[in-house]
Image: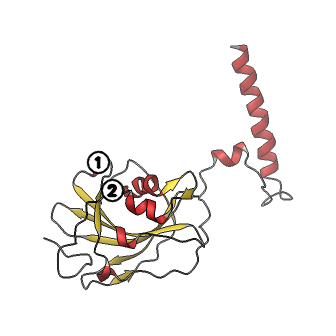
Amino acid sequence: MKRLALITALLGLSIGAHAAEYNNPQTAGDNTGLNIVDMLKDKPQPAPAEKPFTRPELATLKQWAPFTVNYESRRNNFYIAIDSITVSPDDKLVRYAVAVVPKGGVWNVTYEALDCNSAQYRVYAYGNGEGQWQDLNRKWQKVVKENYNAYSGELLDDFCRFDDPLPQDDIRSGFGKTRIEKPGANPGGGMGA
């Protein structure tokens, strides 16, 4: 019991010292290392640095592979366009097209990026009914797991080892050999069975 009280007291002193340093205007913004106060805060990660890239034409994506998402998402099917997966050597981001297909059969397709280093993802565009990308340019968001339709958490596990993306060919081959061609005249959202 005395040992627990001693550890608690030392931790309290450490937090107090770090809080004083963190709130000091002379050292604000000069946080060169992690401290307990920073770890306890739920502040957003900085956005990953992005380099220019070329988005694939939606109509050219023909190799859709099914993948499994958490139990809560059993009402939807999930597909990734294998021929859309790229790993940029410049910014180390994995970019891909993914489809969420509810039981009604409507393909909701988005083009996204995932950063293994910060565990964040970003949606660039969605596929419209004319088979074209419609820009969204959403901000980077933290990857979540075990939420309804939280497929980005599954993809983080499939794309990354520690803080780095796997090689592009390894990611593509990791989705097995099962492929389907997206049904419908146009490969954008709103098309279906």
In this rendering, would 143 be left or right of 110?
right
Q: CA distance from mark 2 to mark 1?
A: 7 Å
Taking the view exactly as shown, the residue that stands out farthest to the right is 26
Q: Which residue is mark 2?
A: 149
Q: Quadrant of residue 126?
A: bottom left
What residue is shown at x 29% (from left), y 82% (from top)?
59
Q: Earlier in the sequence, mark 2 or mark 1?
A: 1
Characterize the local packing of mark 1: few (<14), some (14-19) or many (20 or more) Cα atoms within 10 angstroms: few
Are circles 2 and 1 on residues that touch, CB within 8 Å? yes
In this rendering, would 106 be left or right of 37?
left
Q: Nearer the viewer, residue 76 or 179?
A: 179
Q: Which residue is mark 1?
A: 72
In this rendering, would 130 be left or right of 105?
right
Name the element at disc 2: loop
Amino acid carrying mark 1 in the image: Glu
Name the element at disc 1: helix
Q: Nearer the viewer, residue 149 or 7?
A: 149
Q: Quadrant of the N terminus?
A: top right
What residue is shown at x 50% (from left), y 55% (from top)?
160
